[in-house]
Image (spheres, rainbow, N blue to C red):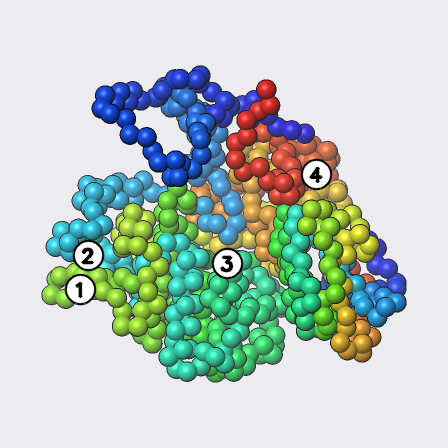
Amino acid sequence: MEIPADLRYTPEDEWLRLEADGTATVGITDYAQGQLGDIVFVELPDLGRTIEAGQPFGVVESVKAVSDLFMPVSGEIVARNDALEQSSELVNQSPYADGWIARIRPSDPAQVEALMTADAYRAQLPADAE
Amino acid sequence: MTLTTEDVGARLAFDRGTPGRRGVGVPRWTGEPTPLPDAHLLRESVRLPELSQNEVIRYYGALSRRNYSIDTGTYPLGSCTMKYNPKVNDLIASLEGFAHAHPLAQPEHLQGILRVLHELQGYLGEITGLAAVSLAAAAGAHGELAGILMIKRALERRGDLAQRRRVLVPDSAHGTNPATAAMAGFTVQELKSGPDGCVDLDALEAALGDDVAAFMITLPNTLGLWERDIQRIVQRVHEAGAYVYGDGANLNAILGRMRFGDLGFDVVHLNPHKTFGTPHGGGGPGAGPVCATPELAPFLPAPVVTEADGWYTQFRPDDSIGRMQQFHGSVGVLLRAYAYIRTIGREGLAETSGNAVLNANYLRTLMEAHFDLPYDRRVMHEVVFSGNRQKRQNGIRTYDIAKRIIDHGLHPPTVYFPLIVEEALMIEPTEAESRESIELLAQAFIEVAEEAARDPDALHAAPQTAPIGRMDETEASRHPVIRWQPRPE
């Protein structure tokens, strides 16, 4: 199970990466995609939508379950990974790169700092998580 | 792998017969032909199967022999309560006076049916302790929607609706609960369960506020566990000015022993196909009675049957949320539920829940050495194991175990629900199974667990004895083909 050290995490198993242009990319973790199993559908947020931290911004559906996606920080949606509409398996194959879900312009950069580090995220997963 | 119709073992109706063959001889029209106006034609022509009556009967006969049903074997599908459907229920429902009644007949010609429906309302009111009953809804989830709409109307009438927009739902709930609340226009907030699998009082406390409309709770919960703090939960929700909505899906665990109304619930829906042995599915609508307190009675969905001086009529409550479907509800299903209740009576209902709990705990005891039990305590009507041990030690997932169970001639259990249990494997033997069939069921699971350690590949390849092997469910979900396609020439 991969937990890249340069990303930030939430207890709901989302990751966030701060980009050079001040936006932040969001997706679900390797652990989350493993728990969900084969993902068959991703509902993406509308561009320009403003979302509060902790609010649902989309849905992932796997053969086992349907789960809400929760936005780690407040802000405006500036991009979304439209490739997932045809190829939802990218979330399984490449959760931290090709399987990214949306990009947001954070309204309060301090919220990014408050998210978990990779070590903190790993520590709160079940002991036998793989 | 591409499945062809031959692999299925039974060619589809479209691939049978021969052009021009007919099942019914239609007399030739001898009058002046009048062409249909082109604007009203949907399409040029439509390809239909061309079969004789004999071929049609054999086709459906072949398909029906592929069915697995409660009448063919043990059906341990957790959360679904696949229990025996007593045949006397069908006999009662097919009596001519019931089966041939016309929905538009006048009340004087429907007194018998109306009386039965009125008595059923009374029984359900007594069973739940919530005396205001409507039989109008067409399914459990439909009854759920009716119940939440009643709460919405009650909030509207007391001037609270604009403020109370949140509905709280535990993370172990049936998916219909959040769907119902969302459909009724509320915002859903999920509550994390505590480490014991029950509602976490602190989480509930933190979520309650003057903007909460209702708390939806299943009792016993979907893990098959009794909510130990239920009285405190109800009290706190009421103190916060919100309503307690009860999902009655698991009533078979407490039937005749505990009543939602006595616990302080405001409204519940029931699932007659789970609790009262009416058929699951069967090609027609089901029923989802709602039972409520006197406070919510004015909002019940119409119609409700009432009696005065021995005369039965249907009426629309003063401030009803309206109709949930046409006519009188799913009378055929309601008659079967009535027959079930009358056949076994008050003592029989209590015995039913006793057997449901006994059977589930017997099964838990037989299997607990072989599978992880995330919530290791006495259960109610069903038990949720985890396939985590097999996953860790043998690289086997719950999905593989379920598929291998098919090779033992049994229906698989429910898998991956409730969502809060990893590799969930949920078994509900139901009150209708004998001691011997529960032992056989446990034996099958134990053999599969042993095989997982010895020969994991056999599980990956399962099922091997079914007409169709392992299906590609991912591909089917990503690229569903939902109608017949002609085969390439």
Q: Amino acid at mark 2?
A: Arg
Mark 3 / mark 2, whichever is N-terminal: 2
**Mark 1 vs 4: CB contact within 8 A:** no
Residue B307, disc:
1
The numbered mark at residue B115 is 2
Crowd around label 3: few <14 · some 14–19 · many ≥20 (10 Å): some
Mark 2, secondary structure of its residue: helix
Q: Are marks 2 and 4 on the same chain?
A: yes
Q: Chain of mark 1?
A: B
Q: Chain of mark 2?
A: B
Q: Are marks 4 and 3 in contact (CB under 8 Å)?
A: no
**Residue holding disc 3:** B176
Left or right position of B85 against A127: left
Give me the chain letter of mark 3.
Answer: B
Q: Nearer the viewer, residue A103 or B90?
A: A103
Mark with earlier residue (4, 3): 3
Tell me where residue A72 appears, x and y as whole percent: 73, 69
- Which residue lies under the disc numbered 4? B452
Q: Residue at x 48, y 25 (%)?
A: B14
Q: Is residue B401 left or right of residue B129?
A: right
Which mark is first along the chain, 1 or 3?
A: 3
Q: Is residue B209 visible?
A: yes
Dot 3 and dot 2 within a common chain = yes
What is the secondary structure assignment of the residue under circle 1?
Answer: strand
Q: Which of the two residues, B332 or B402, is positioned nearer the viewer here?
A: B332
Measuring 61% from the left and 55% from the top, which residue is drawn there?
A66
Q: Earlier in the sequence, mark 2 or mark 4?
A: 2
